[in-house]
Amino acid sequence: MTLQPAVKKETAYVGTGTALATVGMLIVFALLHGIMPQSVPFGVREIISGIIGCAAAAGNFFMMAVTVQKIAELGAQNAAANAAAAAKEGVPEEGADADPDREIPVDPAISERSRQMMKVSYRNRMLLQLVWVLLAFALPIFNGAAGVIPLFIPSLLIKARGTMGR
């Protein structure tokens, strides 16, 4: 499977944005540590936690994008099969003779397979994030807050982009 340009573009956007926001988070940690060193730790633990959290967040988005691409390819296969069937029946697919009210049939098997693929992808991605969250809070080599905050960044980036109309 070759990655579609849209998957590459969106993953680059989310990955870059998440990395920049994680650097911003680490700067805030450092500033707060300077003001309240007893309350807010800052060091290698926080930096490593932020980097792993950033990678987990960007990786989660990439895995979702790949799944959506696979589902879109299934839909394209369904559309191609419909076009072939319509041509065989002599029904024009496009153009002046095409019936604009004609419904394009969706293969229930493809629809169900697509739904299952998305469901499995979501479950696996959430499980991986849960494992990271548990490790970030349970292991003393990580800072839980610095590791978990980056997981929220991709969602905020996507919402901000949608709000701005891009």
Image (spheres, grey):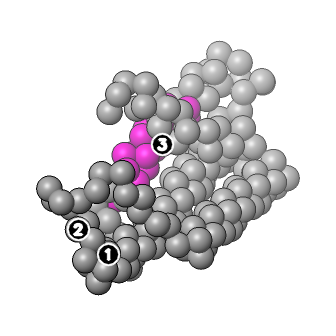
Compared to 148, does 111 lie above or below? below
- Which segment is the magenta one? 8-26
Compared to 92, does 140 lie above or below? above
Compared to 165, does 158 lie above or below? below
Q: Nearer the viewer, mark 2 or mark 3?
A: 2
> In the rendered image, is residue 79 in sight?
yes
Whether pointer 1 and pointer 3 mark residues with C-beta atoms closer than 8 Å, the reply is no
Amino acid type indicated by mark 1 = Ala
Q: Residue at x 63, y 70 (%)?
A: 112
Amino acid type indicated by mark 2 = Pro
Q: Residue at x 77, y 24 (%)?
A: 39
**Which residue bears the numbered disc 3?**
18
Whether pointer 2 and pointer 1 mark residues with C-beta atoms closer than 8 Å, the reply is yes
On the image, the x and y values in percent for residue 123 come to 72, 62
On the image, the x and y values in percent for residue 109 come to 59, 76
**Which residue bears the numbered disc 1?**
86
Compared to 164, does 140 lie above or below? below
**Which residue bears the numbered disc 2?**
92
On the image, the x and y values in percent for residue 49 come to 64, 49
In this view of the protein, which residue sits in the foreground, 57 or 72? 72
On the image, the x and y values in percent for residue 84 come to 31, 80
State which tag comes first along the sequence, 1 or 3: 3
